[in-house]
Image: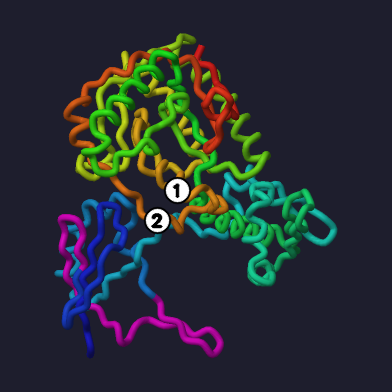
Amino acid sequence: MFKYFAHRTYNYDGRFLQFLERPRVLQYTFLLAHIEIEMDVVKPEVYWVQDRCYRRNPSRNNYLNDTDDRKNHSEAGTAAIASNNDQPIPYEEFSDYSCDPDAPDEEDDKEKYVIEKIETGFKARATTIPASFYPLIIGGKGATKKRLESETNTKIIIPRINEKGDIVVRGAKQKDVLTALRRMDLMCSQARAKRDITHFACFALNTAEVMGKYSDFKDKVLRDFSSSIRGLDDAIFQEPAKLHLTICVLVLLDSREREEVSKLFASLSPDIETLTGKKPHKVRLQGLEIMNDDPSEVDVLYAKCVLDDDTLQSVANHVANRLVASGYSKANRGENVKLHATLMNTRWQQQAKEGFENNGYKGNRSKRESFDARKIIQKYGDFDFGVVQINEIKIVTRHTRTDDGSYNTMAVLPLS
């Protein structure tokens, strides 16, 4: 009887990481636990369905009843193996999905989709899909749309070019309509992740004091080091009127998405008033820092924020959490928003050279050219850019410019 050795490594939550084959013994490696058993892979338990034969992979539920069991199963597993070495150990590779993606009864979907009962079955409008993604749903020569219709047993009606309206999905069963909506939403989520940022929430820093001191900093750096620092160029400096502290970046692709986020933003007012006590708060910009570890190869140099207390940090965290939860942000939320004022960024030089003719998508860009920031940090590392009183949060439109040099504002949320 042929037997083989499989070495599987799991992280703390039991997800599969690594697989190696060797002869003779089957071994599972868990965190702080090693279990050795034998498993017959030549004669597994099988089921016949008509003329088809299916192998049954044993479920881990027979020996691991829940997540907590995985943490403390070592002794029990070893004892079980000692008592019966001939029994195959059940196993199942862990999935990143906690449920069937086509399950029709999730509460979130009941709120997200409105499915109507009609004479021929059910229908729904795909209100979450912007018109810019309609070609994605259609596909080359309509192939993607046809495949979706075939696999979900639905009819998908997409507005023609220059027609306004939503995609409509019709089907005999509610589950089929819901599955089609989910499939399209997943496609759009993946496409959205590839789109460039269109908007961002921020604290504006364009006061006269800060802009004046920043302009002084820029002039001194260019005067002192323009001929001695590799990569130093006027184009990598931020425009004074656009100085800000980023809270959260967004991808908003049509007027409906912009309106939805504006309403969500306005709804945060009571929470913000509670956090701030209906008072403005100040931040000092002093000192220089870089985004990477090597000061000789820098892409982003920023001014550090000195806060009087945690109020602005709490406000930023709350706003970012709500915007990320809306699904319109590309950010991966950590514990705290990293509040910083970007002063120099090599991407701006790259964009100036290439323009923005990329149809809103990332990619096809040349490699960014870094600069050497060692002399700048050494001489101006403690530069004081002044104090700003933060009175409001803004959502602004990227790559725009008003008469005063700042970004176009989409929405404003007062702090007091």
Residue at 74% across / 62% down in the picture? 171
Residue at 19% across / 64% down in the picture? 29
Q: Nearer the viewer, mark 2 or mark 1?
A: 1
Left or right of 237 on screen, residue 277:
right
| Mark 2: secondary structure | loop
- Give the tally of numbered discs: 2
Q: Which x, y percent locates residue 275? A: 44, 17
Q: Which x, y percent locates residue 154? A: 72, 65
| Mark 1: secondary structure | helix
Left or right of 31 on screen, residue 233:
right
Determine contact: label 2, label 1, CB under 8 Å.
Answer: yes
Q: Nearer the viewer, residue 373 or 330?
A: 373
Sequence-earlier tag: 2 or 1: 1
Q: What is the three-letter code of the residue carrying label 2?
A: Ser
Q: Is residue 136 above or below residue 329?
A: below
Q: Does 35 appear in magenta? A: yes
Region of the chain picked out in magenta, as a range: 28-56
Q: Residues within 10 Å of mark 1 (few under 14, many from 20)?
A: few
Q: Which x, y percent locates residue 273? A: 50, 15
**Is residue 280 shown to the viewer in this render?**
yes
Read off the residue under disc 2.
366
Q: Nearer the viewer, residue 55 or 108?
A: 108
Q: Residues within 10 Å of mark 2 (few under 14, many from 20)?
A: few
Task: Find residue 300 and report its image quarter.
Answer: top left
Q: Which x, y percent locates residue 391? A: 48, 14
Q: Which mark is residue 353?
A: 1
Q: What is the three-letter code of the residue carrying label 1?
A: Lys
**Is residue 122 shown to the viewer in this render?**
no
Residue at 31% across / 69% down in the picture? 90
Q: Does 212 appear in magenta? A: no
